[in-house]
Image (tube, rainbow, N blue to C red):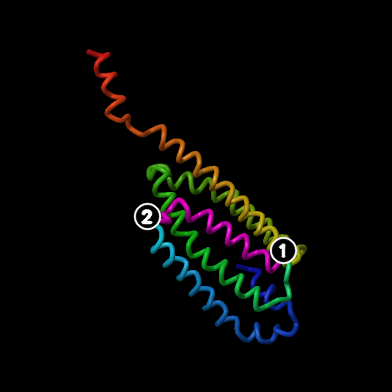
Amino acid sequence: VFMWTPALEANEDYRDAVAGSLGLIFAIFMICTMTGSGIFGKIADDGVFGLAKIPPVVHGLAAASCITPVLLPLNVELMMLSFMLLETMVGMFYPAYGTLRGKYVPEAKRSAIMNLFRVPLNLFVVLVLGNVDSLSTSAVFALCLVVHSVGYFSYKGFDAEAKAGAADEKPQDAAEAEPMLEESV
């Protein structure tokens, strides 16, 4: 959020054009966020794609979108497309994780649990923003790439645990239940 302006202004040939278009660029990003939310709405309940497959795609594409500012920091056109992809993934991220939170975090404990997770997140944000002047734009986006990669693998681990827990909770089928009934009689 704080780095797209300096990243786009890094190329001196585009600095004036970017500076004069910040409102338009921001509006484009907001449209991308809204588009991501709309995409989520279309595919979340889809029997083909479904909710469980959305977070890895979101983190994978968000990580990929951070590659351009790291490797090609002066390619403004490609960087703008990368930021648009990132904002689209942001639009998918919030409803996806909101839905997952509603599904897996008990409502009675949800606010306490979420507040506990906000502490390290806010600490991370304060540390990065407090040191942003000592980091290059490429370094900040490399850090974002790493964080999204960690998010990807963390979600894959969570999803595997959730599937294993769901398999443990499946009711026995009728064939397995009959011998138990006969033994108890």
The kind of residue tagged 2 is Gly
Residue 21: give x, y in percent of width and height. 60, 84
Left or right of residue 19: residue 24: left
In the image, 52 versus 6, the foreground residue is 52
Residue at horizontal 54 percent and vertical 46 percent from the top: 156
Residue closest to the far left: 185
Q: How far is the residue under mark 1 from the one under mark 2?
A: 43 Å
Residue at horizontal 70 percent and vertical 76 percent from the top: 75
What is the span of residues highlighted in magenta in the rendered image? 47-70
Residue at horizontal 42 percent and vertical 42 percent from the top: 109
In the image, 118 versus 163, the foreground residue is 163
Question: Is 123 rendered above or below residue 170?
Answer: below
Residue 149: give x, y in percent of width and height. 62, 53
Residue with the mark numbered 2: 47
- Tell me the tag on residue 99: none
Residue closest to the far right: 134
Which type of secondary structure does the marked residue at label 2 adopt?
A: loop
Q: Earlier in the sequence, mark 1 or mark 2?
A: 2
The kind of residue tagged 1 is Val
Q: Quadrant of the C terminus?
A: top left
Judge the density around disc 2: few (<14), some (14-19), many (≥20) Cα neighbours within 10 Å: few
Question: Is 62 rendered above or below residue 73?
Answer: above
Which type of secondary structure does the marked residue at label 1 adopt?
A: helix
Residue with the mark numbered 1: 132
Residue at horizontal 53 percent and vertical 54 percent from the top: 56
In the image, 37 versus 21, the foreground residue is 37
